[in-house]
Image: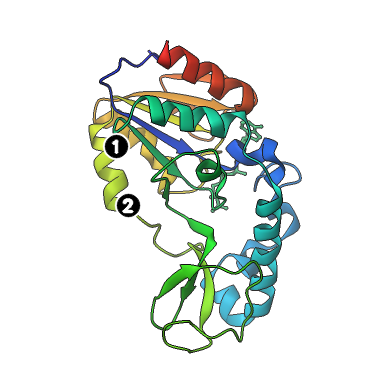
């Protein structure tokens, strides 16, 4: 069921487990980010309003981590799959790192935003984020000091939902990689794809909260599972 013929449409959803072996850590594993930071303080609009400097500090540290990280074999394999099946592979990610792009993937759909991008809360202008963002930095477009990381925080609407929905409706195969299935709407994509007739596969370290909704699952590190699965698909 996991093999996919050349003409089939594949939608891949990735989570923090894809980048864990690149050293970027995850959120809910034993030493994950949300075990060390209070997400209400650093990943909500209310937290940003209360203390923007603390939020910039949190994302500046993650941006520096990301810069120092390297794509792993799983990122490389997904880029390889996309090159081999142009227009047949949609890469949706919950991750805000740019490791898939640095592995050569194109048109990655970042539904939770990107560390490499900045947003002006006043005029909604977007630009490439500097490595270190500061509260008082003026927006390049409107000059107001209202800049924030271009990250979708809890309580905000994820990006590109229409495009993702259309891809799920047309999918023949939906594969979730390295995500715990705890955060919606991403956790509901497996059901959307299955209702539309797709086969579904989970590749992750341990069963996700939505494991029972998948037709098949393989457990292990993404850097092993993903290259093996891509090799199978590409024959
Ligand atoms: N290989 C494959 N999977 C792994 C690996 C690995 N090396 N290491 C960890 N995992 C799996 C874990 O088993 C877990 O299921 O990756 C998943 C990580 O889960 P989370 O930490 O919850 O990350 P994620 O699912 O991406 O979180 C979703 O929550 O906080 C928000 O916006 C944030 O995008 C994030 C969203």
Indicate left or right for 168 with 45 as reference.
left
- Where, quadrant-wise, is the N terminus in this rendering? top left
> Looking at the image, which residue is at 30% across and 37% down?
192
Give the x, y percent position of residue 161. 32, 52
Q: Secondary structure at mark 1?
A: helix
For residue 88, which quarter of the picture?
top left
> What colouring method underlies this structural image?
rainbow
User: Dot 2 corresponds to which residue?
Assistant: 161
Q: Is residue 11 above or below residue 69?
A: above
39 horizontally vs 144: left or right: right
Residue 189 in view, yes or no: yes
Label 1 CB sits under 8 Å from any ligand 1 atom = no
Q: Which mark is residue 38?
A: none
Determine the residue located farthest toward the top in the rendered image.
Answer: 235
Examine the rendering and report whether any part of residue 206 can be seen.
no
Residue 10 position, x and y percent, is 34, 28
- Given residues 146 and 140, the one toward you in this image is 140
Q: Position of residue 162 (x, y in %)?
A: 27, 51
Quarter of the figure that contains the C terminus: top left
Q: Residues within 10 Å of mark 1 (few under 14, many from 20)?
A: many
Q: Residue at (56%, 38%) from the top-left corner?
A: 180
Which disc, if any, is residue 168? Answer: 1
Residue at mark 1 to residue at mark 2: CA–CA distance? 10 Å
Vertical placement of residue 235 versus 206, above or below: above
- Ligand 1 sits in which quadrant? top right
Q: Residues within 10 Å of mark 2 (few under 14, many from 20)?
A: some
Residue 42, percent across and down? 63, 67
Q: Is residue 196 left or right of residue 119?
A: left
In this view, the residue in front, 81 or 28, is 81
């Amino acid at each position: 069921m996991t093999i996919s013929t050349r003409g089939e449409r594949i939608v891949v959803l990735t989570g923090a487990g894809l980048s864990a072996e690149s050293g970027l850590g995850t959120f809910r594993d034993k030493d994950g980010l949300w075990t060390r930071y209070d997400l209400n303080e650093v990943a909500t609009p209310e937290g940003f309003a209360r203390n923007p400097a603390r939020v910039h500090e949190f994302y500046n540290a993650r941006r520096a981590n990301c810069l120092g990280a390297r794509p792993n074999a799983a990122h490389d394999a997904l880029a390889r799959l996309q090159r081999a099946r142009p227009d047949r592979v949609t890469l949706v990610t919950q991750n805000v790192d740019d490791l898939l792009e640095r592995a050569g993937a194109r048109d990655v759909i970042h539904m939770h935003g990107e560390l490499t991008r900045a947003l002006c809360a006043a005029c909604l202008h977007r630009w490439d984020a500097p490595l270190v963002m500061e509260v008082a930095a003026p927006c390049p477009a409107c000059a107001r000091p209202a800049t924030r990381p271009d990250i979708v925080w809890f309580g905000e609407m994820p990006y590109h939902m229409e495009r993702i929905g259309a891809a799920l409706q047309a999918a023949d195969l939906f594969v979730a990689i390295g995500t715990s299935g705890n955060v919606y709407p991403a956790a509901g994509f497996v059901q959307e794809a299955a209702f539309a007739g797709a086969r579904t596969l989970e590749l992750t370290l341990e069963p996700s909260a939505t494991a029972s909704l998948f037709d098949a699952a393989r457990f292990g590190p993404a850097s092993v599972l993903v290259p093996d699965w891509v090799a199978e698909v590409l024959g």
